[in-house]
Image (cartoon, grey):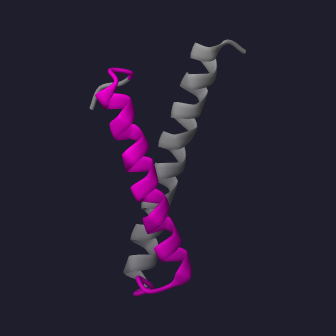
Amino acid sequence: MDRLEAFEKMLADIREQAEFERLEMERLKAEGKEKSATYRQYFGNRMLYKMMLEKYIQYGLMER
C-alpha cells in the first residue's frame, strides 16, 4: 500500500468512526445517558477526530 492509499484509508476510517460515534451519542442522549462513561468517551473521541480533520483541512489534504 502506498502512502496516498494509506492516507485515504485512514481518512475514511476516521470519518466512519466519527459518524458511528455521533449516532451512538445521539442514541445515548435520547436515553438520558449523557453522564455515562461511554458517552463521555465518545465525546472525547469526537474532539480528537475533529482536531485531526481540521488539520487535514489546514494542510489542504481535504475540504470542508
The residue most toward the left is: 64
Residue occupying the point 30% across, 29% down = 58
The picture quadrant where one finds residue 23 is bottom left
Position of 43 relative to 52 (above/below): below
Describe residue 22's horizontal placement relative to residue 57 as left or right. Answer: right
Residue occupying the point 72% across, 15% down = 1
Describe residue 32's horizontal placement relative to residue 63 as left or right. Answer: right
Describe residue 23's horizontal placement relative to residue 38 as left or right. Answer: left
The picture quadrant where one finds residue 46 is bottom left
Describe residue 26's horizontal placement relative to residue 37 as left or right. Answer: left
Residue 6 position within the rendered picture, expressed as x and y whole percent measured from the top left = 63, 22
Magenta stretch secondary structure, dominant? helix
Magenta stretch in the rendered image: 32-61
Position of 44 relative to 64 (above/below): below
The picture quadrant where one finds residue 52 is top left
Residue occupying the point 54% across, 81% down = 37
Position of 28 relative to 43 (above/below): below
Residue 34 position within the rendered picture, expressed as x and y whole percent measured from the top left = 41, 82
The residue most toward the right is: 1
